[in-house]
């Protein structure tokens, strides 16, 4: 069974590469960007939070079609004691900031608490994957201009390919 999963993943990667998709991998995460997206631009900053400093790093990639992919990793000053509350609070802040409506929300499988949320506002269609691991909040955000862009197979493939590298995994590389 494990061999079949690896073969399926390898085949999906080959198809994505053949279609012009780009595999991106760094110490923090890996994913397969849909074809046409530019190189990630990285921006990092530290702000004071209620419980101490929060180190936030954003990676942004855009496409000529008006689409964008944003990966945000926020390292808190201590362990996130209530991951569900952190995820829901982040979701609610996004919805309020964008005056958006949730289309769908599902719990992510796996060990890390997380959710995949699709939502839209008047002129943007978004998908967001939020996950928490110890003291870090991870977010993959896709921004499209139409429902069709958001539901493209390449966007789904990107979310399926998204993998966060925990500090232990990054050290093992």
Image (cartoon, grey):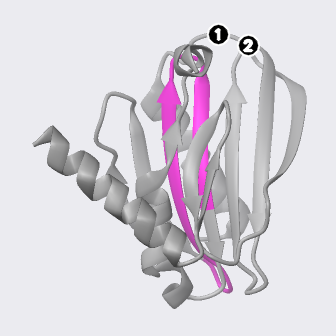
Instruction: Decide whether residue 53 is among the magenta residues.
Output: no
Point out residue 98 in the picture as x, y percentages from the top left corner: 70, 67
The residue indicated by pointer 1 is 78
Q: Nearer the viewer, residue 151 or 2?
A: 2
Main SS of residues in magenta: strand
- The C terminus: image quadrant: top right
Residue displayed at 64% across by 10% down: 78
Q: Helix, strand, or loop for circle 1?
A: loop
Q: Nearer the viewer, residue 147 or 159?
A: 159
The residue indicated by pointer 2 is 51
Q: Helix, strand, or loop for circle 2?
A: loop
> Hey, which quadrant is residue 114 in on the image?
top left
- The N terminus: image quadrant: top left
**Looking at the image, residue 98 lies above or below residue 41:** below
Q: Nearer the viewer, residue 15 or 51?
A: 15
**Looking at the image, residue 125 lies above or below residue 30:** below
Instruction: Decide whether residue 138 is among the magenta residues.
Output: yes
Whether residue 29 is visible to the viewer of this picture, yes or no, is: yes
Q: Which residues are magenta?
A: 121-141
Q: Nearer the viewer, residue 70 or 52?
A: 70
Q: Residues within 10 Å of mark 1 (few under 14, many from 20)?
A: few
Q: Residues within 10 Å of mark 2 (few under 14, many from 20)?
A: few
Taking 160 as reference, is 124 left or right? right
**Separation of residues labelled 1 and 2 (CA atoms):** 8 Å
Point out residue 42 in the picture as x, y percentages from the top left corner: 85, 46
Residue displayed at 39% across by 29% down: 112
Marks 1 and 2: CB-CB under 8 Å?
yes
Q: Which mark is residue 18?
A: none
Point out residue 7 in the picture as x, y percentages from the top left corner: 25, 53
Residue displayed at 59% across by 17% down: 167
């Amino acid at each position: 069974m494990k061999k079949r999963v690896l073969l399926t993943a390898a085949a999906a990667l080959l198809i994505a590469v053949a279609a012009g998709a780009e595999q991106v991998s760094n110490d923090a995460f890996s994913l397969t960007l849909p074809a046409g997206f530019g190189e990630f631009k990285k921006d990092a900053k530290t702000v004071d939070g209620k419980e101490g400093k929060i180190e936030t790093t954003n990676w942004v990639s855009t496409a000529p079609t008006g689409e964008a992919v944003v990966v945000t990793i926020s390292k808190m000053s201590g362990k996130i004691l209530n991951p569900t509350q952190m995820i829901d609070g982040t979701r609610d802040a996004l919805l309020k900031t964008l005056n958006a409506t949730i289309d769908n929300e599902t719990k992510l499988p796996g060990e890390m608490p997380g959710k995949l949320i699709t939502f839209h506002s008047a002129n943007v269609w978004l998908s967001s994957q939020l996950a928490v691991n110890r003291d870090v909040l991870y977010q993959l955000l896709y921004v499209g201009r139409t429902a069709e862009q958001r539901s493209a197979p390449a966007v789904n493939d990107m979310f399926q390919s998204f993998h966060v590298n925990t500090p232990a995994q990054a050290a093992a590389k």
